[in-house]
Amino acid sequence: MDSRERILTTLDHREPDRVPFDLGSCQVTGIHVVGYQNLRQALGLPEVKVEMCDAVQQLASIDDDLSRRLNIDTRGLYPLNSHNWQVVEEDAGEYWAYRDEWGITHHRPKADGLYFSVVKAPLPRTDLTVEDISNYSWPDVGHPQRMAGLRDLAEQYRAAGYAVVLKDAFAGIFEFAQRIVGMENLLMMMITNEKASCALFDKLLELKLDYWQTALTELGDLVDIVTYADDYGTQTSQIISPDMFRRLIKPRVKTLFEAFAWLAPHAKRFFHSDGNVRPLIPDFLEMGVDILNPIHIRAKDMEPAALKRDFGRDLVFWGGGADTQGVLPNGTPREVKDDVRRNIEALAPGGGYVFNTIHNIQADVPPKNVIAMWEALQEYGKY
């Protein structure tokens, strides 16, 4: 059984030979460049120039030798930036700064900065009009140049037996709207200026549809999984009420997922949201979600055995294998292995589970703990 067969089997809610393993297939299943360099060194792999697949989060592109060494079952396709825009870091005193193709300003501290943070939204107001949103200079996310070279790469991955994951062009409409106007502004707008909020969500949906039309026309026959990453949960609850989610967000995401279904009917739909999203999971299923990530098991009401019991027949769980908030960065290798064992025992039976951590592996995770996590997967992940 090769990697693609292994993934497709578990996506069909059947048990493959072992639990599949993902690392780095998209921007929410990866590893920070510092953690990646440390891991390569600990594994005795040669020093290489590490490429980044996500500049904001400083995530490493996974090299072929590490993928083979760890028996990773997935490879990701990352769309390119706009043809007329490049990441250029500028000196901003204590920070490195850049302004992205959306007009969003990011800062990374020079002294000890590990990633970029959004510091300035391009439309930071609550009194926006529909015209303000329409007249803004939006990037052309559906430009064919964003796919340059990706078909050849996808063919290589398919020939090598990997499952192929295609990343979205930008974050989900709720999260990305926060970057455009500011988080506090958006939350106020959704109450006091719903008309403009909906216009913003509709514009972002339009841009997503443009991107996926281009991407799946070019790559759809080679892609096994398409991704959508938004954030609705906190450690204990949800960022907005379930009612507001159902009125303002759910119909638009459902429209996008319906487009996935006719553009690439064979591709499974991967949906990411951190935090406690249990009250929203039935809505996710109604939207057409096949795969839920990252299974934030430290959040309230996200206990893995209960999620598997209640939703395992309908959802594939992708993640939740190791606790990136507590045990993985701070525990001993033995504690990491025990954590992995418990999570596999809860989520893996019957198939429908892909092993990954709870979101990205950060820079401070000891490489010995990443190796312990992987060793536990080899020991406890056999069917």
Image (cartoon, rainbow, N blue to C red):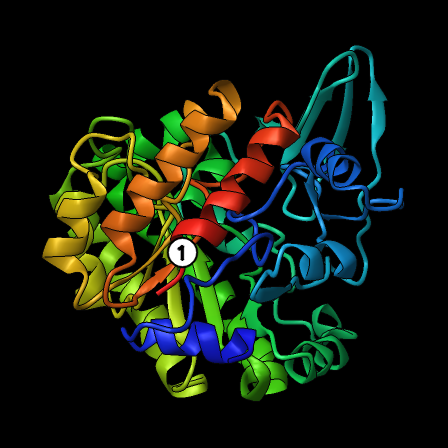
Between residue 268 and residue 196, name the one nearer to us: 268
Figure label count:
1
Q: Residue at x 50, y 37 (%)?
A: 179
| Farthest-out residue, front | 379
Q: Quadrant of residue 374?
A: top right
Q: Is residue 126 visible?
A: no
x%, y% of residue 45? Answer: 82, 46
* 243 left or right, relative to 323: left
Secondary structure of residue under mark 1: loop
Q: Which image quarter: residue 142?
A: bottom right
255 relative to 153 in the view: left or right: left
Which image quadrant for residue 164? Answer: bottom right
Please state the horizontal and vertical placement of residue 138, each as a whole percent of the image.
Answer: 60, 55
Estimate the x, y position of residue 371 in percent, counting from the top left: 59, 39
Residue plotted at (42% across, 72% down): 17
Residue hosting label 1: 381
At 45% from the left and 84% from the top, the residue drawn is 264
Reply above or below: 253 against 307. below
Of residues 153 and 109, the one drawn nearer to the viewer in this rendering: 153
Q: Please, is residue 68 above or below residue 225 in the view?
A: above
Residue positioned 50% across, 58% down in the render: 21
Quadrant containing the C terminus is: bottom left
Q: Position of residue 100 (x, y in %)?
A: 70, 42
Left or right for 174, reference 57:
left
Residue 66 or residue 86, whichever sits in front: 66
* Residue type, label 1: Gly
Q: Is residue 64 at least partly visible in the picture?
A: yes
**Mark 1 Cα within 10 Å, few/some/many (few <14, many 20+)?**
many
Q: Name the residue nearer the viewer: 84 or 107.
A: 107
| In the depicted structure, whether residue 327 falls above or below residue 343 | above
